[in-house]
Image (cartoon, rainbow, N blue to C red):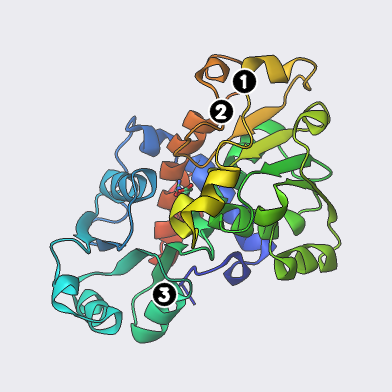
Amino acid sequence: MNDLITMDDLTNEEIIKLLDDAKKMLPAAKGDVYLPLLQGKVLANMFFENSTRTRMSFETAMKRLGGRVLNFTSAGSSVAKGETLYDTMQMIDGYSDVAVIRHPRQGAAQYSADAVKIPILNAGDGAGNHPTQTLLDLFTIREEHNDFENLNIMLVGDLRYGRTAHSLSHALARFNVNLTLVSPEALKMPKEIVDDLLSLGCNVIETDELNENIKHSDVIYMTRIQKERFPDEDEYAKVSGIYKISESNLVGSKENMIIMHPLPRVSEIHPSVDSTKYARYFQQAFNGIPTRMALLCKSLGIDIEKEVS
Ligand code: NCD
């Protein structure tokens, strides 16, 4: 099966192989070498919801590997005429070799995968999952810390609606990290996900306190409060801007602690952090290219290990 809908679609061995493959892709990701492994292949970028990094890094990854990209956005398409997701995906099945889909409805990626023959890569389904973001998050953590075992990782912010936190926590729990989940009561990680993390043997602490946990952390993963998922504006107003990190909060942090964020940030990380040694969020965004290169190759049956020495 070449779909990627949730991190459960990958074994731990497959995850590690993708991260190793991504590392091999770095020169091609930077454009230092041209590696046309996907020449003649077409990727359909199906974005029914806004995106900057995910869409563009998939496009760069495909193009740097010699492939081509069809870009779909729901504005300007026949969705406005009432075309269903099922019918739209039937077209894409015929027009491309692999499709990336982002959709506001949870479950839309699985639904698409069930409807077509080509591989489907979930680039975010509502408040559900975002597994390709998780791959680049894991790559970023591994580049810094080499291994995941026993790392203290703090996930901060909107853990209720934040799909990046859902997918990432699932994956990290499988690699024996300690997770501190920091959120206000109203935005706690869904209970079924916490139960999964615990059943995987992960140490999980749930708290609403950010500052006292900073000095123990190896990774601080900040997230945006997902305004667009709130049923009520007033509820958003109560929690907006609740967690903010600035340079002064970082005094006493571990030497090799890193601060990550899937971006876009709103007010979670003050620009004063950007020039500190802790900031990794822009590097993290770049890491979307090598990891998505590795994933596209896997989905299209190209073994990077054989192709690149
Ligand atoms: C995230 C998303 O779309 O879930 N963005 C991304 O893909 N880098 C995070 C967010 O929108 O807050």
Residue 40: give x, y in percent of width and height.
20, 60
Q: Is residue 195 left or right of residue 64?
A: right
Earlier in the chain: of badge 2 and badge 1, it is 1
193 versus 237 height, above or below:
below
Amino acid type at image mark 1: Ser
Residue 156: give x, y in percent of width and height.
67, 42
Cα separation between marks 2 and 3: 31 Å
**Which one is in front, 19 or 280?**
280
**Which one is in front, 122 or 195?**
195
Amino acid type at image mark 2: Ile
**Residue of label 3:** 108
Locate residue 186: give its quadrant.
Answer: bottom right
Residue 287: give x, y in percent of width and height.
48, 39
Marks 1 and 3: in contact by CB < 8 Å?
no
**Residue of label 2:** 269
Bin the neighbour count of mark 1 within 10 Å (Cα to Cα): few under 14, some 14-19, many 20 and up.
some
**Which one is in front, 272 or 279?**
272
Question: Which structural element holds mark 2?
Answer: loop
Question: Which structural element holds mark 1?
Answer: loop
Whether residue 151 is visible to the viewer of this picture, yes or no, is: yes
Marks 1 and 2: in contact by CB < 8 Å?
yes
Q: Which mark is residue 246?
A: 1
